[in-house]
Image (cartoon, rainbow, N blue to C red):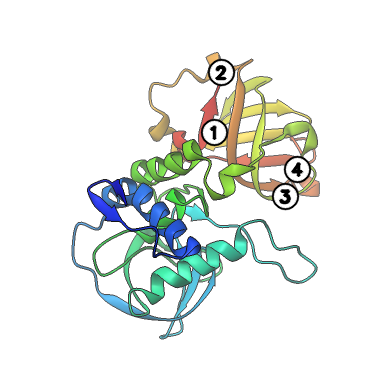
Amino acid sequence: MTFLNGVIVVLKKASFLGAFFLLLSLRAHAAVAFCAANERLAEYSVSYVVDGDTLRLQDGRSVRLIGINAPEIGGRARMTEPYAVQAKRRLSALVKANDNKVGLQLGEQTHDRYGRVLAHLYDRHGASLEAQLLAEGLAYHVLIAPNLALADCLTQAEQQARQQQLGLWKEVTFISAQQLSRGGFTLLQGRIQSVQRNRAGVWLELGHSVTVNIPLNALPYFKDQAFEQWQGRRLKTRGWVSERTHQQKKYAKWRLTVNHPSMLELQ
């Protein structure tokens, strides 16, 4: 018999898998509670879960969870990424435990470019499904302005999994700027070679034709930052890398956009 946070867990009679997820849930409790909804939300029936960060409602709408990026399920000659299946199964289990219903809290930006609804998801008790996935190491925390409402608590949820090396964080690797060879979601690291400002924001040049952009509309979140003093420091970040078009070849080939300080780690 083991006591965790005042809860008695009887492991003898539990299956190994059941005990594993129970322990994960207990570890995630603080972060998930911190992200709890502050009001009663209307519930919507779920038709099916697409992957660890997307689901389809019975009314036909697709919903993309705000604040996380889960590993991709393979298809069309693309490999399934590590923990993609686990993330999908876990989100499916969380939805099923709530009678296949979820509460939606729409983002300030309500839809993405694919027409999907952008929302935070909650169970009937107001617990955040995004925080649960992050705290169990089954997704990465990402922030895209203006949908930054839960930035602090979702950062805390991911940090908990990272410190305990759960899920993705058992073997995660930040690739160097020298190794970057394709676009898409990337964990990136490199030394800041130069810092530049213009009307598009701040640009952190990592060398090897890789740049990190903090756009102008995100700069208020970086108040009091002396960006010029960042030159020479090592940087870790994450986000979607895009390749510049042919007309933009005079600029760095690869660009990653960052909208919030929690997406940057300076060393």
C-alpha span from label 1 to label 3: 24 Å
- Of mark 1 and mark 2, the one earlier in the sequence is 1
Of residues 34 and 223, the one drawn nearer to the viewer in this rendering: 34
Circles 1 and 4: CB atoms closer than 8 Å: no
Q: Relative to residue 93, is residue 187 drawn left or right?
A: right
Residue 132: image location, x then y, percent: 40, 56
Q: Which of label 1 and label 2 is nearer to you?
A: 2
Residue 10: image location, x then y, percent: 33, 58
- Of mark 1 and mark 3, the one earlier in the sequence is 3
Q: Which mark is residue 230?
A: 2
Q: Residues within 10 Å of mark 3 (few under 14, many from 20)?
A: few
C-alpha span from label 3 to label 4: 16 Å
Q: Residue at x 52, y 46 (%)?
A: 166
| Mark 4, residue position | 248
- Of mark 2 and mark 3, the one earlier in the sequence is 3
Quarter the C terminus occupies: top right
Q: Which of label 2 and label 4 is nearer to you?
A: 2
- Of mark 3 and mark 4, the one earlier in the sequence is 3
Q: Secondary structure at mark 1?
A: loop
Q: Which mark is residue 199?
A: 1
C-alpha span from label 2 to label 4: 26 Å
Q: Residue at x 65, y 22 (%)?
A: 192
Circles 1 and 3: CB atoms closer than 8 Å: no
C-alpha span from label 2 to label 3: 25 Å
Q: Amino acid at mark 3?
A: Gly
| Mark 3, residue position | 183
Q: Which of label 3 and label 4 is nearer to you?
A: 3
